[in-house]
Image: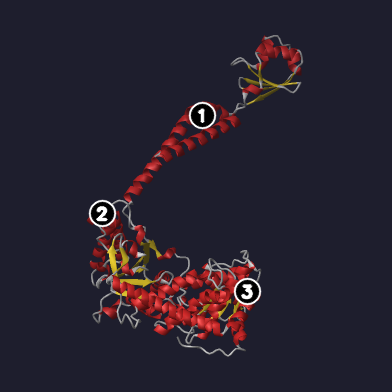
Amino acid sequence: MSKIIYKNIFWAIVTMISLTLIFSVLFEATGKTETLSINQLVTKINSGEVAKITVEGNNLKIDLKDGKKAIAKKETETGLSQTLNNYGVSSSVLDQLNLEVKEPSGFKFWMGIILPVILPLIVIGVIFWFLFRQAKGGVNQAFSFGKSNLKLFNAFKEKISFKDVAGLKEAKQELVEIVDFLKNPKKYLDIGAKIPRGVLLMGAPGTGKTLLARAVAGESGVPFFYISASEFVEMFVGVGASRTRDAFQTAKKAAPSILFIDEIDAIGRERGTGLGGGHDEREQTLNQILVEMDGFEREARTIIIAATNRPDVLDRALLRPGRFDRQVVLDLPDINDREAILKIHTVGKPLDKNINLRKVAVRTPGFSGADLANLMNEAAILAARDNRKEVLQNDMFQAVEKVLLGPERKGRAISLKEKEITAYHEAGHALVTVCIKGADPIHKISIISRGRAGGYTMKLPIEEMHLRTRSQFIGEIATLMGGYAAEQEIFGEMSTGASSDLREASKIARAIVTQYGMSEKMGPMTFGETQELIFLGKEMSSGKNYSEQVASEIDKEVKNFIDRSYKAAQKILKSHKKILDKIAKTLMEKETLEQEEFYKLLKEFNLKPIEI
């Protein structure tokens, strides 16, 4: 309310200032002009000081010979000549006087009468108009409070089809059937097939859930409504349920249609949090969604598509058949999909003719579609920064590292000793990697700081892997311990640079023992149980289901795996110390070694991989 008052005061002040300016234009200020009586005027006429007299009704405008101006008034209903003659001005003087008669301005006359009456009414009317407009807006807002902020697909500027979505073959197949059902429902109904009531898109952030929904909108040719789940929930109880009813009712009226709810976990979390009981606003909104989805008739041709990256927290009633009948999982793209996605995101970007997108796809395992889009954008930015008209292969490689680790910090001042420690640390990682059988190939070694990393060794798998063996885990731990072992071998002590390697190695070793059952001593068992705690949704908590004696045995076995891998790394570095020195010295000179340079450097040494 205070904002409305201040706003009205502001406009009232603006109006008054405007009126003041109008008055100043219409009426001349009397303070700058001398007012004369008839006697004074007669005196000046007889003394020859008056150059011209302009008559406007009863008003006289007098121009004096010295350049000054004056005003006076004559007698009402009496001519100026007669008035002056009555006051003693001779006829000869009147004949020499320059007299001009003007008709009085009707506009000024009427404004002088009307404005003093009308202006206060105008000001009061304007203030009341603003007050009523604000009140009307509040009333409209109150009546639309329970309406959903549902938007139609027409608001999208770019129309997307399934051709614009690379990869996700199985997910697209599921959605193609949905589109076909909406276009040709008779084909399915005649054979007794029912329309899927809901489709849930599940996947990690950036895998393309919303993009697929937009592709469905572009392909379906039916009204496509979309809304964020967070828009349903308000602080007032019952508003979310009201908006849910309105959204579903709107979609039903436009049937055949699609209603897309983004980030449904905002309202679809597990019920029974213990906060608010059955009157919790979020729970009421979820209950209304359950009722609306379960109330569709067989002939109703409205499909609900929802997206979430947290399917583990969704209420079980929402996932049962009859509500979200289809649950489509969107995986991270494999190497072929990544290459196809990169091709899509290169459209509109001038590329060097020698660019190989396959090499970029090899360097980006675990990247989502959004990550790849960001990668291409970063590569274009790097090219523009160097004032180049084309994106080079190296721009893409630099963008991969920037997305993974952060920007280069070449300006970071480090001592020669720290540079040497970093060089031997990364050389230790690289040498242990190439000496272990089955390890991933090295793609790049660098001692240039990126983000929080002082240096890094990039090793990536040749092909996509979904299963890992015990020997691969142990080899990974040995690779992680390579930097730590190299520092101890060369300098006789360790630095803090190995802290992240030790943390990751410990994590892998504990998982080998407690989760994967790969320890011969502990046997094919898992230790520790994961519990689902329902509080503000669903949270994961790990609890102990074993004794303190077993915990001690687990700790010993974890240490055994780390010691075993560490000794293997030490053995490799001691037996190939000349190679370690050469790699480190080359890094000190060049700071970066690409894959070809690194393997060319090792070519003269006959390295044989070993099994741990």
Q: State how far apart marks 1 and 3 are (Cα).
A: 84 Å
Residue beneath the point at 50% across and 81% down: 569
Q: In this orientation, which residue lies closer to the viewer: 597 or 204?
A: 597
Residue 549 in picture, x, y percent from top left: 29, 73
- Identify residue type, mark 2: Gly
In the shown orientation, is residue 464 left or right of residue 535?
A: right
Give the residue pinned by disc 1: 115
Quadrant where the image shows the C terminus: bottom left
Q: Counting residues from the N terminus, which is met first, the one under dot 1 or under dot 3?
A: 1
Residue 445 in picture, x, y percent from top left: 57, 77
In the rendering, which numbered label is found on residue 515? none
Q: Counting residues from the N terminus, which is met first, the one under dot 2 or under dot 3?
A: 2
Q: In this orientation, which residue lies closer to the viewer: 254 or 314?
A: 314
Circles 1 and 3, Cβ within 8 Å, touching? The answer is no
Residue beneath the point at 61% across and 22% down: 57
Q: In this orientation, which residue lies closer to the viewer: 603 or 163?
A: 603
- Identify residue type, mark 3: Glu
Report crowding for label 2: few under 14, some 14 to 19, many 20 or more residues within 10 A (C-alpha): few
Residue 562 in picture, x, y percent from top left: 43, 77
Q: Label 2, secondary structure: give it.
A: loop
Quadrant assignment, res 508: bottom left
Give the residue pinned by disc 3: 591
